[in-house]
Image (cartoon, grey):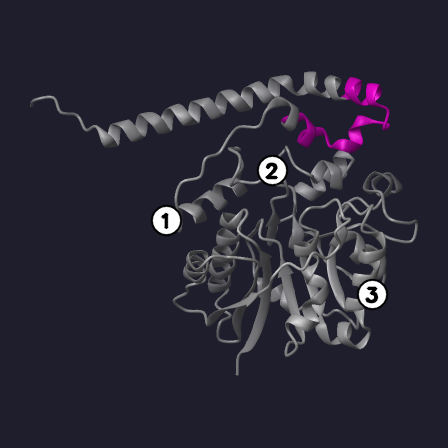
Amino acid sequence: MQERISVCFCNDHEQIELLYVAIKSLVSEFEKTHRNEVFALDIYIISIGLSDEMKRTIESCAGSSISVTRVIFLEYRLQGRYPLCRFRASEIVTLVFFAPEFFPDLERIIFLDSDVLITGDISELWDIDLRGRWLGIVDKAYDQSQRARTIMRPLSALTTPVNSGTVLLDLVKMRTENISHQLDSFMEKNQKWLRTPEQEAFEYVANNRIHLHHKWNWRGVAPVSEIYWSAPTMKSVAEYEAIVPSVVHFQWPARPNRYHLDNPWFDRWNDYYDLLGLNPLTKKAYDLLLFTRMSVGTHRLGSSKKMRILFRFSRHALVLLPTYIAYRLKLMGSRARALVKSNTIARPDSRPS
């Protein structure tokens, strides 16, 4: 009898195209492993107002010729939880807290953000032994030095910041230890000042957790990415970039549905999107300010004093200006070639022979 791998996404209609590609890449990579004789794949969608058309597209994305794949929708109506939280989507991102209630018959589950691209064998993640812990999650900082910890700003000296793009949960353990209540209580009490609510709740409540390898939540999507926030030394950046990811996490704002970027992971995301035959997306180029911010990372800007921030930001912007100009010129050239190609196809040579 096949073991069923349970994977869950929580989504409203915003950025729905990210969810389409996440599911398509998940199923495609699962097919490549040829482990469908051992495993079957259940994809759960906690739907916050998704239309019937969106659901049909999701089911199409999960279509597979060889793997036994099911899509199960769970409807959820927002209840106004945590009204004082500054993070607008706080109720959506914290639905993971209540996984034991959503899935009373399951023993474990994988939660994924929708802004991911699956590039490896998800069954390897499913097989990870949590060794009696209820949570497996990736640390936010790759470099575990004191400098990195200072940059990542843990809640206390006893905690380590995490990123919840990929989460492996032992639901039995969560029920036994009443973890949902602990996470909800922490969120309720601290909602006013939390910046990344579900991540900070995991950081505080789950001190005793399994630290998943960074390949399961790899955020180095480009030279303009959060790897420079996660790995603040050049040595650790080089090590981080050398990781072969199984889950690529396109964190805001460096997402392939919004921007043009010369990056193989953006290209692979675009390939999946084109394969789905969906309407073309309107994308834009990075402006210099955003390019600089993503390239240097906020920790490179010094203290919180505004004048010092502006000075250091300008200094980094000037250093990056040649790189940014090259990026824009290359993008302009790519667009020009695409335009010429489309015009050639649309207007075949009509000169008389």
Secondary element at image label 1 = loop
Secondary element at image label 3 = helix
Tell me if mark 2 has few (under 14), some (14-19) or many (20+) residues whose alpha carbon lies within 10 angstroms of its own.
many
Q: Identify the residue at horizontal 58%, vertical 52% (top origin).
A: 114
Determine if residue 139 is in view: no
Q: Which residue is mark 1?
A: 277
- Residue situated furthest left in the rendering: 353
- Seen from the viewer's position, the closer of residues 165 and 132 is 165
Nearest to N terminus: mark 1 or mark 3: 3
Q: Which mark is residue 254?
A: 2
**Which quadrant: the C terminus?**
top left
- Residue 293, x across and y down, in percent: 69, 29
- Seen from the viewer's position, the closer of residues 211 and 22 is 22
Instruction: From the image, state whether disc 1 or disc 3 is nearer to you.
Output: 3
Q: Which mark is residue 236?
A: none
- The three-letter amino acid code for the residue at tag 1 is Gly
Q: Gap between marks 2 and 3, in whole Å?
A: 33 Å
- Residue 61, x across and y down, in percent: 44, 58
- Residue 341, x across and y down, in percent: 31, 29
- The three-letter amino acid code for the residue at tag 3 is Gln
Q: Which residue is mark 3?
A: 182
Secondary element at image label 2 = loop
- Check contact, mark 2 vs mark 3: CB within 8 A: no
- Residue 24, x across and y down, in percent: 47, 56
Magenta span of residues: 291-312
Give the image quarter of residue 137.
bottom right
Give the image quarter of residue 143.
top right
- The three-letter amino acid code for the residue at tag 2 is Ala
